[in-house]
Image (cartoon, rainbow, N blue to C red):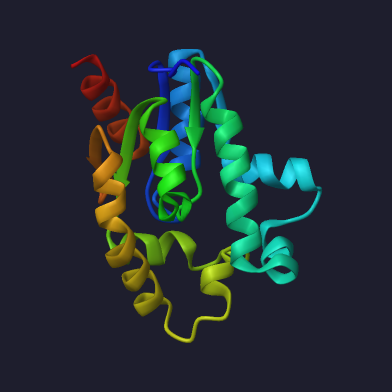
């Protein structure tokens, strides 16, 4: 299979802005945008929460890998991954060979603010200490994000247009 070196894949923890940045970048560049979590819910007809409840995280991760493989085989698109997509080595390999991989780096505080009212974050839903949960997730996954990122953008304290402009400058390099 030929690798699609013209795709853009956004990675980072939940609440780092992958979907928002992806949509905006897609409009700016005039190419299609796909969110892997939305693709999973479209294919299954149920929410991510429901999949976690019925199939557990393992079942969800299998579905996520299948969707990522399909998306990464497409050409000239922007993909926002789920925050945990990088856990699987197979996913990291698939993502790495599809094009530019942009890690949206975010602080625990920023993610806490962005996810505070969300009811659709299965890993935070039953957490007694959301700050610790987010911190643990970031600490575990940061090396994996960095391993495959071709571009890292620190989103802390930046407006959407600042993040988009920084990505566009980096992509031109």
Work out which residue is located at the far front of the displayed protein and give it: 1
Name the residue located 50 percent from the left edge and 13 percent from the top edge: 30
Q: Say whether residue 22 is visible.
A: yes
The spot of residue 124 in percent (x, y) is: 51, 72
Q: Percent position (x, y) of residue 39? A: 67, 39
* Horizontal arrangement in the rendering, residue 90 relative to residue 37 (left or right): left
Q: Is residue 168 left or right of residue 44?
A: left
Q: Considering only vertical position in the picture, is 133 above or below 59?
A: below
Name which quarter of the figure residue 108 lies in.
Answer: bottom left
User: Dividing the image into 4 quarters, which one contains the C terminus?
Assistant: top left
Visible residue check, residue 17: no
- Which residue is depicted at the point 51% across and 30% down? 23
Measuring 57% from the left and 74% from the top, which residue is drawn there? 125
The location of residue 106, given as percent across then percent down, is: 30, 54
Task: Please tell me in which quadrant of the rendered image residue 65 appears.
Answer: top right
Which is more toward the observer, 120 or 78? 78
Task: Work out which residue is located at the far bottom of the displayed protein and give it.
Answer: 128
Name which residue lies at 53% across and 70% down: 123
Point out residue 170 in the picture as x, y percentages from the top left corner: 22, 24
């Amino acid at each position: 299979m030929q690798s699609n070196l013209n795709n853009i894949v956004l990675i980072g923890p939940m609440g780092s802005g992958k979907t928002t940045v992806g949509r905006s970048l897609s409009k700016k560049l005039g190419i299609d945008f796909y969110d892997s979590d939305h693709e999973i819910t479209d294919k299954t007809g149920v929410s991510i929460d429901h999949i976690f409840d019925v199939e557990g995280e393992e079942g969800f991760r299998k579905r996520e890998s299948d969707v990522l493989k399909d998306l990464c085989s497409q050409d000239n698109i922007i993909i926002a991954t789920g925050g945990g997509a990088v856990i699987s080595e197979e996913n990291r390999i698939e993502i790495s060979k599809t094009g530019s991989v942009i890690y949206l780096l975010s602080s625990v505080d920023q993610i806490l603010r962005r996810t505070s009212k969300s009811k659709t974050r299965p890993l935070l839903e039953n957490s007694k200490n959301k700050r610790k949960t987010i911190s643990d997730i970031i600490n575990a996954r940061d090396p994996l994000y960095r391993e495959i990122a071709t571009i890292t953008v620190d989103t802390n304290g930046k407006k959407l247009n600042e993040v988009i402009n920084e990505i566009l400058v980096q992509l031109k390099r």
